Image (cartoon, rainbow, N blue to C red):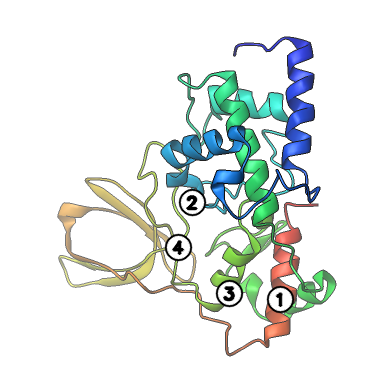
Amino acid sequence: MRQLPQKILYALLLFAAVSCGNTGQKDTVTASTGNLPDSIIVGKKLFEATCVRCHGMDGSGLTGPSLKRPRLAHAPDLAGFIQTVELGIAGTGMPSNWAYSDSDCYHLYAYLGYLRNKGKETPTGDTAMGRVVFNTSGCLNCHMMNGQGVGIGPDLSEIGASRSPSNLRQSIVDPAAELPGSTDLDNGYGFSLYLPLKITTRDGKEITGLRINEDTYTIQLKDAANNYYSFNKDELKSVEKQYGTSLMPSFKKILSDQQIENLVAFLYKSGNE
């Protein structure tokens, strides 16, 4: 990574804090892109060119985590952000971007600060009551949290670190609308995880469950009892991928609006403490 001179780095950090802070000054967050500082405009173009595929158009997260969080584990400050963008994060879907200069990274950093303030979401629910909803609504029958529960669905221990409140809310009321995406670089990066499957073997045996992994020749799934299966595709009679469905039920009519907001607040707190 190219190192910025110390004086310049301090100046950039100060400028980023002023540009990205919620100060109410007319040059920070405005409705018209034309009135934004040049650094944010440049950062927006860079973000839309390379980042939206994983982090979403507004930075709320897709296969990659939400960038609107108050704390980014690998990029707590500008220097960490530059290192993350240029070198990537080993073992994850975050690639290295050697073509980006320190100046490019600074523009991206400024734009992300703008996004966080412009679209900042603060859960309105009560986290303590949300914990009660979580513990009494059967969530641990399918999810793990802090070592407890059953791991059929995604682990929720730090779910708030990668998903925005609106994404969490959608997962509760309409879980089939958007399934989590795989971040496995070697096997199916970007495909929908937890996709319901119905597999029929050549001898007529039917197995239903959730897709765990898939490549050109094999497919793996687990059933509702958390039993795992792996098949060579040429051994199967059919594979029915049930897009638009989810094993998780909608809680829209099960929980009240306030209970949902409380649950969202509780889940969002996980990973943001």
Give how far across and how far down residue 39 sits, in percent. Answer: 60, 32
Between the residue at mark 1 and the residue at mark 4, the CA separation in whole angstroms equals 21 Å
Most extreme residue toward the right is: 128
Crowding near the residue tagged with mark 1, few <14, some 14–19, many ≥20 C-alpha atoms within 10 Å = many
Q: Secondary structure at mark 3?
A: helix
**16 to the left or right of 237:** right
Please identify, in this view, whether the residue under mark 3 or under mark 2 is nearer the observer. Answer: 2
Between the residue at mark 1 and the residue at mark 3, the CA separation in whole angstroms equals 10 Å
Give how far across and how far down residue 149 sits, in percent. Answer: 66, 66
Q: Is residue 93 visible?
A: no
Mark carried by residue 261? 1
Identify which amino acid the numbered label 4 is placed on: Leu
Q: Secondary structure at mark 1?
A: helix
Q: For the point 57% across and 64% down, which residue is it?
A: 167
Please identify, in this view, whether the residue under mark 1 or under mark 3 is nearer the observer. Answer: 1
Please name the residue that numbered disc 3 is placed on. 172
